[in-house]
Amino acid sequence: MAVLSRLALTASFALSASAAGLGGSWQQSPLTSPSSLSSSQGSKPLISTEALQEAISIDALVERAQKFYKFAQTSEEDYGHPTRVIGSTGHERTLNYIVNTLLDQGDYYTISTQEFPVTLSNVFESQLVLGSSVSKSAVPMGLTPATRDREPVHGQLVLVNNDGCHDSDYPKNVKGNIAFIRRGACAFGDKSIGAGKAGAKAAVIYNTDPEELHGTLGEPTKYHVATFGIDGTEGNAVAEKLAKGESVSAIAYIDAEVKQIQTVNVLAQTDEGDPDNCVMLGGHSDGVAEGPGINDDGSGSMSVLEVAVQLAKFKVNNCVRFAWWAAEEEGLLGSDFYAASLSEEENQKIRLFMDYDMMASPNFAYQIYNATNAYNPAGSEELRDLYVDWYKSQGLNYTFIPFDGRSDYDGFIRAGIPAGGIATGAEAVKTKEEEEMFGGHAGQWLDPCYHQICDDLGNLNHTAWEVNTKLIAHSVATYALSFDGFPKREQETKISSYSETIKQHGPKLIM
Ligand SMILES: [Zn+2]
């Protein structure tokens, strides 16, 4: 298991950076480029959206994708397959490549890193036996501890009353047995804590609808017990038996390790342009452990990087700030950390944040987050409409998708900063209507390899990727040139209605 260390990063950054002072916070740790590559903005043409879009080519993107895949392959020794998950050499190489590519742009950007801690859990092996059969839908919850001594534990399933959100919901005989808890009303982590406090050896949370339950317990506590999610079909059958007073025994087994590592967000800001009015954009540099993460979010990371490289040929009026977030897949940790650590003064300098996560899904739809000013900071809707107008101008169809906390815009909205973005789809099933609008295959996932081993070089739709990278270029060029007509930042924020509707925080459900 390779651990991303500050030393390893510093050592490799030093190869191309004359003075790589790494670590500390975003303002404190600029990485400097070799002075021989210095290039002033003076002689460059002023940014124009046509020129920046023109500079985007699919060939350059695909070349970057081949590199990302090679980085993922360096993790094979530790993981048995290619991955760019946090803590892997694949992720470390990704970060180095992003930084080195930015350093190659001479003094156009001030590049920095922001270090933060991440709690990780690796599940090595797991099994849940319900009665006499192995559960087909059991999935260990994210950040679950192992079962005791990393060995199977045996007990009776005990049906917990109500939703298991209060200590009083746990019958006495949970002690020494396995708590069986319905999904809903409070976070999975709270249910696991309730089971642990009541003395359960393990907990099983069952879904209220037929789907599998992929959730996370959130930050570990000493009360968490080994916890599985199961689907509603299996869950309801068992719950009915238990409710009738029948006994069902179970064996739970999770071999896992939970540990903390340090990782980094990479940031780059234009030296020129009004530093008090910044347009910010980002994608996430990490992927999941299950696969190489070339579409999720290799594609967005590379689109943002390619736009950064092409932007360096132009002069800007407003500052442009790029971000590559780490630990998105662990629950938006990098972007949360960044947005939450902004001082009020720094917060106000960010006019908007644009999120670019999954730009090239094979069975794509052109999706725009339906971010409105009624529920989000003012400006979110103007950004949404910029995407709408562009797709219309290209004669392309688009759909609105919920702005529901699934990606890195979440921390910005919560910090009162207008945000939005585009995507091409994950595990949503393509509808007949979407097939008519975008082609592809109705009845299949928009990204059939979402969070799987096959999210590789074959998992990129080149048409969608090029189209969307041109749209990213358009979004950057528009605001780098001018914020005319774009709402000024408001001091007070409108996030309460937003927070109330959010059930996700990143790719995993929290309740
Ligand atoms: Zn993603």
Image (spheres, rainbow, N blue to C red):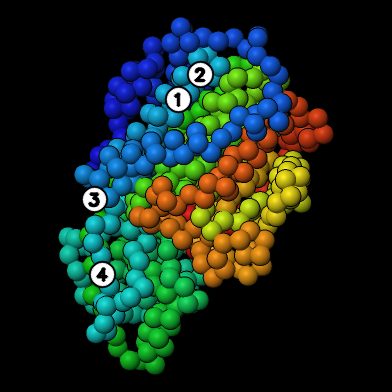
Q: Which residue is mark 1?
A: 101
x 67%, y 48%: residue: 495
- Identity, as a three-letter code, of the amino acid under mark 4: Gln
Labels 4 and 1: the sequence-earlier one: 1
Question: Circles 1 and 2: CB distance less than 8 Å?
Answer: yes
- Identity, as a three-letter code, of the amino acid under mark 1: Thr
Q: Which quadrant is the N terminus positioned in? A: top left
Q: Relative to 131, is 228 above or below?
A: above
Q: Nearer the viewer, mark 2 or mark 4?
A: 2
Q: Residue furthest top?
A: 36
Q: Relative to 106, is 308 above or below?
A: below
Q: Relative to 423, is 472 above or below?
A: above
Q: Secondary structure at mark 1?
A: helix
x 37%, y 61%: residue: 141
Other residues around mark 2 within 10 Å, as few (<14) / some (14–19) / many (≥20): many
Residue 391: tell me if it is visible.
Answer: yes
Q: Which residue is mark 3?
A: 80
Q: Which residue is mark 2?
A: 105
Q: Position of residue 506 (x, y in %)?
A: 50, 52
- Identity, as a three-letter code, of the amino acid under mark 2: Gln
Q: Measure how far apart labels 1 and 2 are at the Cα level.
A: 7 Å
Q: Position of residue 92 (x, y in %)?
A: 34, 34
Name the mark on residue 127.
4
